[in-house]
Image (cartoon, rainbow, N blue to C red):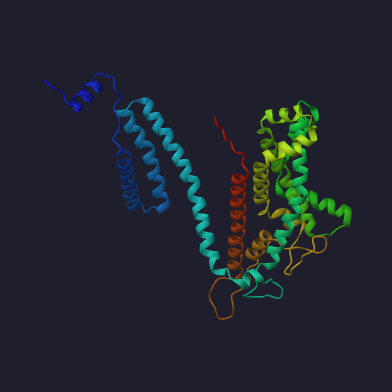
Amino acid sequence: MTTTPIDRDFDAITAGLVQPKLPRWAELLIGAMSLAVAGLLALLLGWGLVAAAIVAGLLFVVGMPLWSLLVEGRRSATDRFATCLVWGAFVAVLVPLVWLIWMVLKNGAAALSWSFLNESMRGVVGDGGGIYHALMGTLLVTLAATLISVPIGLFAAIYLVEYGKGNKLARVTTFLVDVMTGIPSIVAGLFALALLVVLFGPAVRIGIGGSIALSLLMIPTVVRSAEEMLRLVPSDLREASYALGVPKWRTIVKVVLPTAFGGIVTGIVLAISRVIGETAPLLVVAGATDSVNMNLFSGRMMTLPVYIFSQYSSPGVPAFGTDGPPPGYARAWGAALVLIGIVMILNLVARVLQKMFAPTSDRRR
């Protein structure tokens, strides 16, 4: 009597040689059932869409491992439960991100125009005006903060990796850098304000103060990112350079830094993206103004985060005879969209530079 493949699989399963598996459509079935139950509860209890989605997700996380436990066993059920938790965490992070981008696009796209990008708020009472003064202030303050932070952070990272191995000063420096990573931005602003008060007297508000405050927030990120990239450079490259009689400083300049250049640039760009949206230190030190100021060392300077805060906190009143929202809300959403666009461009630049300058590993036999 001949046996078919189905009979052999059934015999192997009954003999305990092959672990039974759920069908490929098990996830779809559990998902459909979870959505159906959550939708029914939402209709009966009057829940909203968000509550129904949360209940459906919880039912899927419970139902999928339970079915797997009954069919596949404890080990596979544990694996499926962990997989559900990972996907659930991913969705929990993705949903607010997508919602935020959608809200900014929805409320800010209508405000974007050439006049919005090319005009300031000088003399504007109701509708009109733009973000030109805030945009220029953000670029100047961030550029100055980068010029302050990059040399300090890069030289500190070189010392920690190349000269400070096993040194007590290097350990203390690493500890202080880690502490600076968690400093609140308002504390950095107060430090910069205290420094300016000592140098220029009380009631001073200038753009360079905002750059100093932002540099305090950038330096730890630059140090840590550059340090990790320098540590990834193989020691064989250094030893080969030393064997040829090259001094250590020249080895760092000609061998170590070019090898880690892509990662260092990526860390710098990410540090800029991290501080370009700070509001508290700029509001404390750089102040706010409605006019264009291109001088970092004289007068108040508006930046995009402070502009968004000021427009939303003082939105003005609608035009006479209209029943729409105050004009400041539209300007705040438009500035927020521009700021997010700048951060996105910086991150894309970091990705491109990382791929361009990444060391190639061509192993040919």
Q: Looking at the picture, how far across and down is residue 77, in whole percent?
A: 37, 29
Q: Residue 13, located in which quarter of the rendered image?
A: top left
The structure residue drawn at horizontal position 80% and vertical position 30%, both measured from the top left corner, is: 169
The structure residue drawn at horizontal position 54% and vertical position 73%, both measured from the top left corner, is: 324
Q: Looking at the picture, how far across and down is residue 132, in whole percent?
A: 68, 67
Residue 77 in view, yes or no: yes
Q: Is residue 248 left or right of residue 94?
A: right
Q: Looking at the picture, how far across and down is residue 110, in whole percent?
A: 54, 69
Q: Is residue 57 left or right of residue 154?
A: left
- Residue farthest to the front, as pictured: 365
Q: Is residue 36 above or below residue 130?
A: above
Q: Quadrant of the C terminus?
A: top right
The structure residue drawn at horizontal position 66% and vertical position 71%, both measured from the top left corner, is: 118
- Residue farthest to the bottom, as pictured: 321
The structure residue drawn at horizontal position 71% and vertical position 46%, both measured from the top left corner, is: 218
- State how many labels appear: 0
Q: Quadrant of the N terminus?
A: top left
